Image (cartoon, helix red, strand yellow):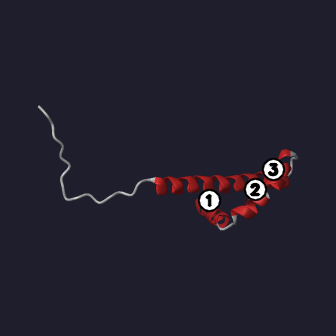
Amino acid sequence: MLESSLEKIAQQILSLDEASLVSLWDKYKTRMEHFEPSKEWEKAVIVFFIINAVRAKNQIFNEQIMQQSLKPAKTPRKNRPDLRLIKT
């Protein structure tokens, strides 16, 4: 049940636009920095870290895509076995 709920939340978060989330980053950072023992403060902390999680996920994703695009394409090999000359 808990795992299912978390996956639903993750799916909803993934549908959000990163640019829109980033525009809220300063607002929630400021709220988080001004501690007060309230549910509103707790929610602000969670929202702040959700925004950071989306940003981190996108950064990792983009780096991986970039690395894959930089790898040289594998050229098809001729029908030769992998043999090498060994001198004795």
Q: Which residue is mark 3?
A: 29
Q: Quadrant location of the N terminus?
A: bottom right
SS of the residue at dot 2? helix
User: Does residue 65 appear in the picture of this structure?
Assistant: yes
Name the residue type under label 1.
Answer: Leu
Q: CA distance from mark 2 to mark 3?
A: 9 Å
Q: Quadrant location of the C terminus?
A: top left
SS of the residue at dot 1? helix
- Left or right, 36 with respect to 53, comes to right
- Outermost residue toward the left? 88
Q: Position of residue 72 (x, y in %)?
A: 41, 54
> Mark 3 packing: few (<14 Cα in 10 Å), some, or many (20+)?
some
The disc placed on residue 83 is none
- Left or right, 4 with respect to 51, comes to left
User: Does residue 39 appear in the picture of this structure?
Assistant: no
Name which residue lies at 39% across and 58% down: 73
Q: Position of residue 18 (x, y in %)?
A: 69, 62
In this rendering, which labeled residue sits more in front, label 2 or label 3? 3
